[in-house]
Amino acid sequence: MNESITKKLNMDPLILLALKEDVTSEDITTNAVVKEGSRGQVDLISKEAGIIAGLTVYQRVFELLDETASVEKYVNDGDSVKPGDLLAVVDADARTLLTGERTALNYLQRMSGIATHTQKVAKHLIGTKTKLLDTRKTTPNMRIFEKYAVTVGGGYNHRYNLSDGILIKDNHINAAGGVKEAIAAAKAYAPFVRKIEVEVENLGMLKEALEAGADIIMLDNMNTNTMKEAINIIAGRAVTECSGNVTEARLKELAGIGVDFISCGALTHSSPILDLSMKNLRIL
């Protein structure tokens, strides 16, 4: 992430919303128990093995609550960690440490879980030309964080949003009256720099999409034999993407067919968190 721009325009508003969700008026427990003006330090510790992603977001939570906060990091995004590893030490107003703890951990655990899962899945494609893509199946208001985590784990990003590219799906085709009609409408409407991707479910739709000049063909929910035939028909005339019913067990088989990309919604919608903890708070 470009920190200077992304923080101000994208990260900060979303992080502040998350903090406001947790603190509607005050952190009543912390304000009751911790003396105002106390300075503290706390350790960030890994409780399981995985890949770390989101340290900038984690740090930013504390900085937004306390501009004097600092984080001494012992790992970087993309590093492997194991149980018991000391990942960072956070120094800030003690009330800040307690108030921001859950929000900061929620971001870091979620992002690290996605990076860990993505790396595990992407390993099946090593040595092939096929690249692993995420989708827009992300948690609301978490997309920039979750898609970043996919890249840390070795995956690649598909569209960020509906303005990012043209992807004609089944309901677009139904609304337009057919594959050719939908592609023609997209070409007439969209800027010439936009590529046109079309989702096809059978070989008849595929042939129509090629004839109409689609740049990218998404082979959706096809069985292996149909997909092999589709790749032969395309013969390099369009970039290919496989989607739907993509399981970890099928990845090598799908890559062997020769598709350029495999998109997998599970990277973001089904990755478990990586268990992390903030422990050993010390009042200085």
Image: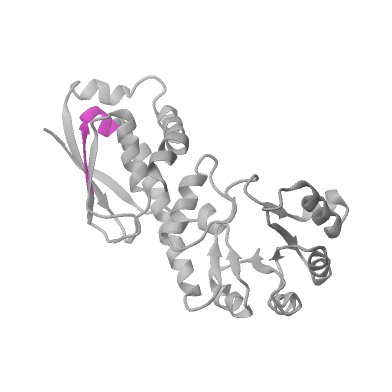
Residue 123 lies, in percent from the top left, at 45, 72
* Residue under the point 41% across and 46% down: 2
Left or right of 187 on screen, residue 181: right
Residue 236 location, quadrant: bottom right
* Residue under the point 55% across and 57% down: 134
Left or right of 13 on screen, residue 27: left
Q: Is residue 89 magenta?
A: yes
State the quadrant of the C terminus.
top left
Residue 184 lies, in percent from the top left, at 83, 54
Coloration of the structure image? one colour
Left or right of 36 on screen, residue 60: right
Query: Does residue 137 sit above or below 227 in this rendering?
Result: above
Residue sitting at the far front: 192
Residue sitting at the far left: 284
Residue 133 lies, in percent from the top left, at 55, 61
Residue sitting at the far right: 177
Q: Does residue 123 appear in the picture of this structure?
A: yes
* Residue under the point 79% across and 68% down: 210
Residue 54 lies, in percent from the top left, at 37, 48
Q: Nearer the viewer, residue 143 or 10?
A: 10
Q: Nearer the viewer, residue 111 or 70?
A: 70
Q: Which residues are magenta?
A: 88-98
Residue 258 location, quadrant: bottom right
Query: Does residue 279 sit above or below 9 in this rendering?
Result: below
